[in-house]
Image (tube, helix red, strand yellow):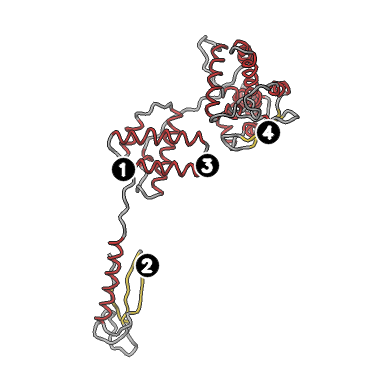
Amino acid sequence: MLNVSVYNRHRASCAHRERFYKRCDCPKWITWHRVGIEHRISADTYEWNVAAAKALKIEMAYRESLDSTPVPQPQTIEKAVKLYLADREAQHLRDSTISKLTTIFQKQMVPWFAGIDIHLLRDLTLPNLQAWRSMWSDGPLAAKKKQERVVGFFYFCQRNKWIADNPATGLSRIKADIRPAMPFTPDEFTRIVQACEKFGKTEMQRLRLRAFVWLLRWSGLAIRDAVTLERAALTDDDRLILRRAKTGVAVALPLQPQVALCLRRMVENDNPRYFFWSGNGLPKSAVADWQRSLRRLFEIADLKHADGTKKRCHAHMFRHTFSIEMLLKGVPIEDVARLLGHSSIRTTEKYYASWVKARADRLEESVKAAW
């Protein structure tokens, strides 16, 4: 409520000094406070009643302005998700990232809350989010990343003033231990290469798979970067010059001559621009095809732990093998981070710090000194 009042600015000759004395003929002024700021204007009159009428007029105009202010409609969860995804697309995030966000919010969250008859953001509470999270089937690390995205979504809603508080900040922390990066041993890699000879029906299929395995092992490329590797990225002096799809970081990597030669023999392809991709469809579809081929290859290689149990293998282990060998040979972790295309050395340290040769040597000397 706006409280507008009248007061006097007494002349020096006036016998009265009370600000709100109504019967003198001194100039009348009007004052009010709004948002902590004092406003003062002249009433342009010496009569109290006239000034009071002007003060009332100011109050009424303020009330009318409040009445005419449209009441914002409550935002629906579905509409908020659409606006959130549109905002993320405007940031030019990768297609794979947009796909993950679409799955989490448009395909999972919206239908789940609609199923329990919650459609408005303002009706969504922390217990609702906890109930939804209890239905997730993701592993610990995937669930942790998913929860981070959920918190980010509600921060987006809060910044847009659709909700006063972020209910997702009350979700308990998900514990996800990072598994230590484990490489292939030289013997295991040899068995994988030998298994290439038993793969597929044609020599070209085996040649392509063998070249792909060699590239992953000796370049440290992530599988998406390997699948979408362009022929132009291989220079005449056997170097790979490319930009990582995930981080956008430039990578300049010397390649072993035999690996480069193996790549140059890849002459049969549906698209002359790429080594391992036809160029048709989305890159993630091509990546999925190669992942299936590698799973089949690992089955043929039949790698096992020392106790005879089957070893679970995946494409990223080639990247681990490359990175760890570099570190054990004494290559500084800063250089390994650059070769891997990490945007921050912290990422490299998180997975490979225990494999740094200089650190391992210091630990060994400390143990010997304790003897």
Figure check: 239 above or below 268: below
Residue positioned 54% across, 22% down in the render? 289
Q: Of discs 3 and 4, which sits in the foreground?
A: 3
**Given the current orientation, which residue lies at the most extreme top position?**
308
349 above or below 165? above
Residue 252 in the image: x percent, y percent?
Answer: 68, 33
34 and 358: which is toward the camera = 34
Alpha carbon separation for disc pair 3 and 4 = 23 Å
Q: CA distance from mark 4 to mark 1?
A: 50 Å
Disc 2 from disc 3: Cα separation: 43 Å
- Dot 2 or dot 3, earlier in sequence: 2
Lateral position of residue 144 relative to residue 163, left or right: right
Mark before the other along the chain sequence, 4 or 1: 1
Q: Amino acid at mark 2?
A: Ile
Residue shown at the point (30%, 86%) measured from the top left: 26
Secondary structure beneath label 4: strand
Within 10 Å of disc 2 (Cα), the crowding (few <14, some 14-19, many 20+) is: few
Q: Label 2: which residue?
A: 37
Type of amino acid under label 1: Leu
User: Could you tell which of marks 3 and 4 lies nearer the N-terminus?
Assistant: 3
Image-quadrant location for residue 48: bottom left
Residue receiving disc 1: 120
Secondary structure at badge 3 equals loop
| N-term-proximal mark, 2 vs 4 | 2
Q: Which residue appears farthest toward the right when viewing the image?
A: 237
Q: Could you tell me how far apart the alpha carbons at marks 1 and 2 are, in whole angstroms?
A: 36 Å
Going by the image, does 125 lie left or right of 95?
left
